[in-house]
Image (cartoon, rainbow, N blue to C red):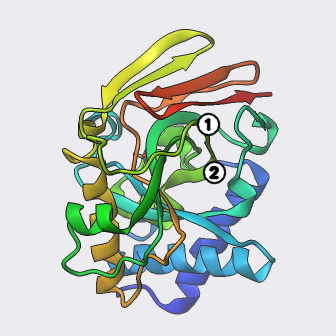
Amino acid sequence: MNLDSQTIQNLALLLETCQLEQRETEKVTNTHPDMDWEDAYAIQDELLRRKLARGARIAGLKCGLTSHAKMKQMGVTDPVFGFLVDDYIVAEGGEVDTRQLIHPKAEAEICFVLKHALRGPGCHIGSVLAATDFVIPGIEVIDSRYRDFKFDLKSVVADNTSASRFAIGGRPMRVAGLDLSTLGVVMEKNGEIVGVGAGAAVLGHPAAAVAMLANHLGRRGQEIPAGSLILSGGITEAVTMQAGDRVQVRIHDLGSVSMRFV
Ligand code: OOG
Ligand code: MG
């Protein structure tokens, strides 16, 4: 670690204030070019600590930048991981208030709910499928606190991987008998198709993203608890949303989920 604990607390406070007041900031590596991965996740941990102290509950975990479409869109090379709290939950078909957000974008995701805990290192697609209760379609709304949605990997980790809202819905399905890599995904904005893809867009198989998350947490002495919801990462590019827009994600065999921006 290169940053002291006061600096980590200050940066978490800055990023959370930006989130709560819908303000953009410059990426934290501009002001702290020497920060390392541990510092980045320590800032994210401090953000979580602040939210939990105010009464928020963990609602899930997320993998980000797991598809080539997303990595290319954001100009980065590796997946990142973050958390979701209960304030971020949007009902299936529900409304997202854009006044609470800076510059939201929506993503189509395959989501996992675990029946057993997963503890890395050593997790692979097989361990994830064995621990999965069901998969279900999801929409993640990301809202980077960085100006113009521009960042590098450490900055986006510190900013909890742009997490801001999510909805799940459709038809929960057991994974036995499903081929998650060939599941077709269609994303529509206001009834027009804005993205198409398949599960394999995420690291060849979306369960690979969950395995990476378990291995990442394992290195930090943590696990994915039983019952967790995990967003495995956007299949297609993220799509900008404004008040008045409606987004719908349809996944083969898993039905659809939608939300409206007001
Ligand atoms: C980082 C978060 C990306 C995903 O599903 O790839 C993400 C960002 O692009 O702002 O959530
Ligand atoms: Mg996402």
Image quarter in which the N terminus is found: bottom left
Image quadrant of residue 262? top right
Please give the name of the residue rendered at 35% of the width and 40% of the height, measured from the top-left corner.
Answer: 74
Question: Residue 145 in the image: x percent, y percent?
Answer: 59, 51
Q: Amino acid at mark 2?
A: Ser
Please give the name of the residue rendered at 32% of the width and 83% of the height, measured from the top-left corner.
Answer: 218
Residue 25 seen by the camera: no
Please give the name of the residue rendered at 54% of the width and 49% of the height, measured from the top-left corner.
Answer: 146
Q: Residues within 10 Å of mark 1 (few under 14, many from 20)?
A: many
Which residue in the structure is indicated by mark 1? Answer: 104
Q: Residues within 10 Å of mark 2 (few under 14, many from 20)?
A: many
Q: Amino acid at mark 1?
A: Pro
Mark 1–mark 2 distance (CA, rounded to whole Å)? 8 Å
Image quadrant of residue 59? bottom right
Q: Could you tell me if the residues under marks 1 and 2 are in contact, i.e. CB atoms within 8 Å?
A: yes
Secondary structure of the residue carrying tag 1 is loop
Camera-side residue of 111 and 98: 111
Ranked by sequence position, the earlier of labels 1 and 2 is: 1
Any atom of ligand 1 within 8 Å of the CB at mark 1? no
Question: Residue 216 in the image: x percent, y percent?
Answer: 31, 75
Image quadrant of residue 47? bottom right
Residue 221 seen by the camera: yes
Any atom of ligand 1 within 8 Å of the CB at mark 2? no
